Amino acid sequence: MKEEFKLFLSRLLPIVLILFGIPLISYLIWFFTPVKTLDILVLDKTVRDKSYQEHQGVFWVLDHSKYQNSQKEFYDKSADYLGFFPDDSPAYGTKKDLAGRTRASIDSLVSQKDLVFIADTYGVFENDFSRPPLENPSKKIYGGMDISEIHLINSAKQQGKTVVAEYNAMASPTPKPIRTEFENLMGIKWTGWIGRYFDELDTIQNGDIPGWMRIIYRKQHGAWDLSGPGLIFIKESGEMEAFLFNKDFQNKTPLIRTQKVNKHGFKLPQVVPYPDWFDVVLIERDYQVISYYDINPTPEGVQRLRSMGLPRFFPAVVYRQLGKGRQYYFAGDFSEVKGDLGSPRFSGLPFLWRSLYVTGDFTDRRSFFWNYYQPLLEQILEEARKSTN
């Protein structure tokens, strides 16, 4: 009996080491890795629930890379941001932002920060809190960029701080005068077009296509007679166009391309599928393109893009140097992460997930996070940290 028990333990030991030993070693490596100091201000007005999906990816990277603020505290995704804080009150939540603060107050706040990250300013609406969510537009509770955020960006620019902004920072419901100020400060011009990829446009097979999208398309084109993979382009004025796979474009999904050897020094996959919302922007000449979108349009697709006033390639991630700081723009809803990413406090975890999530798998949004967003943001944070020294 003793020999059988010893044999059982010998067979069990490798399993125990794999299940407990490797994670323990991984955690200990993370624990003893030196912390880094970087003061960051995150703005997210689109917080519908306590998953914090519009900015949880940012905070995961901060925690995994062991960034602390100047008070030697780790960042908390539920508290360390400005924007909307949902709760169970009749008002659905509370607002904490820069509204009403003087320019001197904002200048003082920026002087204490190293990086400003504008994750999302779209905001929250009443139908975001109905169960199930309603399809029709509803009353805005909170959202849109305002003049205080313009002062924030301007102050960061003047003080040589790093600014990162992404998709939905300047679109509706931000008023046009505020958007113009944002565009001037950031050196970026929105074409008015946004786009979204769907792996199936047949509404019988795909129930995720919004009802409002189908209604607007039918009004303009008579019927939603679409099927197969496709891209839906929507202009701020309400115009809507559908690009169909093989007819208008030849990459089954929009691709984010990054040159393997680039002067920017960013180490990213050369090709990553991106099946989500993006905006089409024009950039000033002093910007460097880190990555760009490629849908590989057919000759007919190229003509349609031209008629819409759009280029063959769209910027995906760009930056420009301004003194010690940089301005970055992500032309996509990159920071949003649905689902649990797991604990960030294990060394080597991104490498493990990148080996499990194939770069070409666009069906799970976490594949994009591990293969593109996490290494991109990690390098941006490190660059910002170096600029403070």
Image (spheres, rainbow, N blue to C red):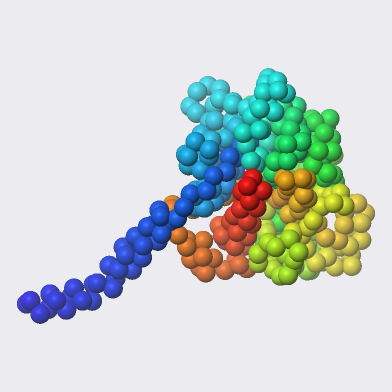
Residue furthest left in the image: 1
Q: Which residue is drawn at 71% across and 70% down?
A: 260
Nearer-the-camera pick, 105 or 85: 105
Which percent across, then down, holds residue 311?
87, 57
Q: Residue at x 63, y 51 (%)?
A: 386
Q: In which quarter of the image is the N terminus?
A: bottom left
Which percent across, then down, holds residue 388?
64, 45
Relative placement, left or right, of 358 versus 265 is left
| In the image, residue 47 above or below residue 203 | above
Nearer-the-camera pick, 262 or 364: 262
Which percent across, then down, holds residue 81?
57, 35
Q: Which residue is drawn at 85% across and 51% down?
A: 286
Q: Residue at x 89, y 62 (%)?
A: 302
Nearer-the-camera pick, 339 or 286: 286
Which percent across, then down, holds residue 40?
60, 40
Nearer-the-camera pick, 205 or 110: 110
Count all numbered tags in the image, as a single digit: 0
| In the image, residue 248 above or below residue 96 | below
In terms of image quadrants, where is residue 157? Answer: top right
Residue 220 appears in the rendering: no
In terms of image quadrants, where is residue 30? Answer: bottom left
Residue 17 appears in the rendering: yes
